[in-house]
Image (tube, helix red, strand yellow):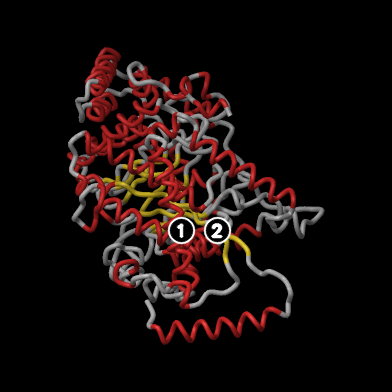
Amino acid sequence: MFDEKTLEEARKLQEQWDQAVAKYERDFSSKTNSGIPIKPVYTPSDIQDIDYEKDMGMPGAYPYMRSNYPLHYQFQPWINQPVHGYGLPEDTRERMDALTKAGMEGYFGGRSYNLVWDYPGYFGIDPDEPDAEGYIGKDGVSCNTVEDIGRMLDGMDLAKNNIVLINGDTLPMFAIYIAYAESQGVPRADLRGNTMNWVFTAWYAPNFMWETEDALKLATDNIYFCVNEIPRWNHTNIQGHAISETGADAIHQMSFCLATAIAVADSCKAAGLDPDKFMTGIGFQIAQGNDFFEYICMFRAWRKLWASIAHDRYGCTRPAAMHLRTHTNTSCFELIKQQPLNNIIRSAYHAMGAALSGTTAMQIPAYDEPIGIPTEESAVITLRTQQILLHETGVTRVSDPLAGSYYVEWLTRRMEEEGKKVLKEIEDAGGFVKAHKEGMLARVLRKGCDQWREEIDTGERIVVGWNKYATEEDLKVKAFRPDPEVARLSTERLKDYKARRDQAKTDAALNGVVVACERLKKGEWGHVMPACIEAAKAKATAGEISKALRKVMKWGPEYNVMLKF
């Protein structure tokens, strides 16, 4: 990286610096939030073994550490992707329109709507079921039928705008969306957007949905369908943000996501899919937290590791198959309910870190999310935070502007090394699926949670407004108030929907889902998603399609090793 003359000069200057700080008679070394020891200063000597061409390269060139593209924000800014969803479909549409009016932008004139479902919908439960009581429309939209999708998306150009479906029960919700699109004359091949495909990748949650192997089969079948029938659809989102919220530090967020993606990719390859095709639809939702430089370096190391995995393990040759597709969700767990307006400042720093990392899409939680669903005002502030960052700070003028920093390059290399260590530990444990089922990954997350809380309780980790600079009375903010009639209206609509359908036709279509799952169990790919779509067209609800899947595929909580801890 540097010639010998430069390194010798650096060593001499380091000696002078050492003498200058010796008078302070204390150790100024520290560590990142992931526990990586760091010095108070870095020089060319710390990165002398980095090969510029091999290890860094230029933006848009393998190993893509600096960016997926030769020009990044200069050509196309990141997508504004605020997450929204609450109440009835028309309530969520009102928020979608408000954000559109406020200037939410996607790629090349389109928009990207990040739509989140309520808890019952997330777990494949219809609002008329007892388990849904108390949760309908509270933490996401209650949207369970083709007609509900129509209420939310009426008049939208589905071939131009990205529709992101955020729910755990991926296949049923995706099916009702496709059924609606085709009822509006939009061919499925023209659709663009994103399914989370969390039937497998929600492993980090104590209440994950499906038993591990069956979850992987369902996730793979969705990918099989998308690769062959919806080529522009991003079929899988590996959830680093939620792993971070569950206790992972930056190293384990990156490593656990990569290990999850490897398990998914191995399954897809075993199903006969071409890595150069299916890898382009795998994306990562990445948390950007308080440790400003560590998360930036995590991002850069992550791009490099993913490119090398795609190239070396799967033989990918297409650049698009080696690109790390990213959506940054800035940290939620580092926002607090005490002095909540301070969260605007925290999120702005997180967003700056995401921009300097080279993310391609961004969601910023609202300052009042520790209290409840964001108000329209707070949701617009999150969008304004991105817009100020984009238009007023100058961060978009240069690709990877932190490249060459001694500290950034050293820490990026260290993050890469630590990530490889964790991936090897998982491989040595028998692979990701086995490590998950035996609780190895859950123990890491639990330990991270306990350590985080202990550091706050002891004051080792300072949180302004909580354990330092606290005030007797918190700032008052206007909290969101959900409509108490949502549950009643959603349930009545569902009953009316069922009463107007041809029940025999619906039952036959739901039986088709069962048959498709039985074929999947035998190793026959590509039949479950089409069967789910046919059931949605026959007016089956998302919950009913989910129940049909569960008649064959094993339901996760019965096998949940995490509950033992």
Which residue is nearer to you in this view: 122 or 244? 244
Amino acid under label 1? Met
Furthest residue toward top: 504
| Number of numbered markers | 2
The image position of residue 188, as x and y in percent, is 21, 40
Binning the other alpha carbons within 10 Å of mark 2 as few (below 14), some (14 to 19) or many (20 upward) gives some
The image position of residue 185, as x and y in percent, is 20, 40
The image position of residue 193, as x and y in percent, is 31, 47
Residue under the point 21% across and 52% down: 316
Which residue is nearer to you in this view: 73 or 357? 357
Quadrant for residue 263, please give it: top left
Task: Say above or below: 36 vs 223.
Answer: below
Residue under the point 73% across and 80% down: 23
The residue pinned by badge 1 equals 415
Which residue is nearer to you in this view: 5 or 123? 5
The image position of residue 123, as x and y in percent, is 45, 29
Amino acid under label 2? Ile
Which is nearer the N-term, disc 2 or disc 1? 2
Quadrant for residue 325, please give it: bottom left
Label 1 residue SS: helix
Asked if labels 1 and 2 touch by Cβ distance under 8 angstroms, the answer is yes
Residue 105 visible in image: no
Image position of 524 (left or right of 4): left
The residue pinned by badge 2 equals 36
